[in-house]
Amino acid sequence: MSYGLSYAGAESDYDSADAFLLGIPYDRTSSFKSGAAEAPAHIRRASYNFEELHFEHGLDLPRLNIFDQGDCEHVFLPEDMMEEVKFFISPAIRDKKFTVAVGGEHSINMPIIQCFKRNDIALITIDAHLDSRDEYLGTPYSHACVTRRAAEHLGIDNVFALGVRSISKEELERDDVIPYTTSFEIKEKGIERAVKKALDSVKSEHVYLSLDIDGIDPAYAPGTGTPEPFGLDPLDVKRTINLIGGRLVGFDVTEVCPPADPSGITSALAARFINEVLAVHSKYLT
Ligand code: MN
Ligand code: MN
């Protein structure tokens, strides 16, 4: 456990918190460029750039009580990361907190999804990649296996990937391809239609949104390990969060790589998406 600067506005204690934030500085399965372990600290720092209130959501939103747990231990083996994340996220989900996880690479999503009961949620990802391999570079817990592990736990009809534009042959040539929409289709037909397709496709009412920052075009989010051209623009992602709206029960942002982000623009974008999610969640808080 490490304690540094808390996320901006996270002044609540655990018991009275509506939202629970955890940093997961893990990047040991990274296939191209590592450094995502540094992201939680950079994203927390970037959170101080912004007004606490985002006026476009209305001026009288209830103020959300946010608890920032700090970062979990920086471990080496993916199995240890899985245990470490579950140790913190499991109780938060049990206590009905809205969870926000700050990666780290995308593999940090797998233990979080496994903390939910099978029929409780669907997973929607925003990602340049389908991440649906059975295993990658010798581990089933690689960041290239995220949607496959989620499909095993939630059912394949409870997983959907938005913004995909990079898929391997082995992922496409199988009977159980993870449902997805490409960034090309989103650009052609609009984000509203794509999100509707995703929400209609999944079975569970409650949706967990996992944002791999490489889903966004590298022109807007250059600081990531595996940049992939032809991506979504940030307003597509903002719109997605708002369209999921009251169905949203948890969120993670992953694959921000500060060493590849000298201007800090990618960390700032990640922080702004966390704020967006919190603002939308507070709108539906009863
Ligand atoms: Mn990706
Ligand atoms: Mn990914």
Image: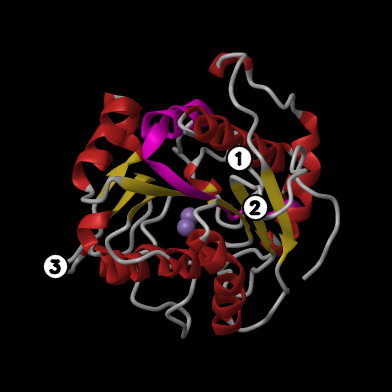
Q: Is residue 215 left or right of residue 83?
A: left
Q: Magenta includes 33?
A: no
Q: Which of the two labelled residues, at mark 1 and mark 3, occupies the earlier sequence position?
A: 3
Question: In the figure, residue 62 lies in which quadrant?
Answer: top right
The amino acid type found where label 3 is placed reads Asp
142 above or below 194? below
* Residue depth check, mark 1 versus mark 2: number of the one nearer the observer: 2
Q: Count residues near mark 3 (Cα–Cα under 10 Å), then give few for <14, some for 14-19, many for 20+.
A: few
Q: In this view, does 274 lie to the left or right of 48?
A: left
Front residue of 195/31: it is 195
Question: In the figure, residue 130 lies in which quadrant?
Answer: bottom left
For marks 3 and 2, give the CA distance: 37 Å
The magenta span reads: 234-259
For marks 1 and 2, give the CA distance: 10 Å
Q: Which of the two labelled residues, at mark 3 and mark 2, occupies the earlier sequence position?
A: 2
Q: Where is residue 47 in the image (x, y as percent from the top left)?
A: 75, 38
Q: Which secondary structure class fits the magenta region best? A: helix
Q: Residue 175 carries which label?
A: 3
For marks 1 and 3, give the CA distance: 35 Å
